[in-house]
Amino acid sequence: MAKIEESDLRKLHPTQLTVGMIVVKDKQAHLTTLSPKERSEFMRGHAMPAVRGPGGRLYVTDHHHLGRAALDAGLATAFFQIDGDLSDRDSSDFWKQMEKNHWVHPLDENGVRHYCTHIPDQLGGLVDDVYRSIAGYVRDAGGYDKVPEAFAEFVWADFFRRSIPIELVRAEFHEAVAQAIPLAKSHRAKSMPGFNGK
């Protein structure tokens, strides 16, 4: 089991471009209801997997929503555990290895792929993709199962992006979620990660 360590939140670097800000705000609200001791225990219990990169910099590969929520809630530190050490690589080789290991996902809020160098340097630079929030809410409602594969929510976000108009998502978010749940259980989603069809 990897050792859990603590870091300044501003020193944790993302490996994606976007988060669902509705989900971030929900997590932020939850954190603000906890006492300082409870917050620390919660964050330790949800340690972010990270890879050590060039110069010893820490790149988180999951829990970006929680990291951004903690930052927005005013927390100074968060917990992480090292899943890989690529600190001996130069920047170009580092990102190639990150891609090979599926530890990076540089898609923007429109589902368009970018070079890894476009990823923001800090969690505070992540931008909103409202379809990531749809994906999170649908999963929480049992629309599909959480899976260990990295970045499955991006796949679901793109699935919903192709079927639910952005105007509805922005104007009536919960109605969009209500439409997305049966869509996630339909035959159209059979090849999706975590499909449960229940």
Image (cartoon, helix red, strand yellow):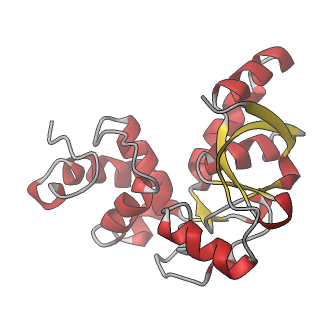
On-image quarter of the C terminus: top left
**Location of residue 59 (image quadrant):** bottom right
Residue 165 visible in the snapshot: yes
Q: Residue at x 80, y 46 (%)?
A: 72
Total marks in image: 0
Return the x and y of residue 191 as percentages of the image width and height.
18, 58
Return the x and y of residue 90 as percentages of the image width and height.
75, 77
Return the x and y of residue 197 as percentages of the image width and height.
14, 42
Q: Residue at x 9, y 56 (%)?
A: 187
Q: Residue furthest left?
A: 187
Looking at the picture, does residue 22 appear above or below residue 86?
Answer: above
Return the x and y of residue 167 as percentages of the image width and height.
43, 71
Q: Nearer the viewer, residue 82 or 142?
A: 82
Q: Residue at x 64, y 37 (%)?
A: 27
95 displayed left or right of 133: right
**Location of residue 16 (image quadrant):** bottom right
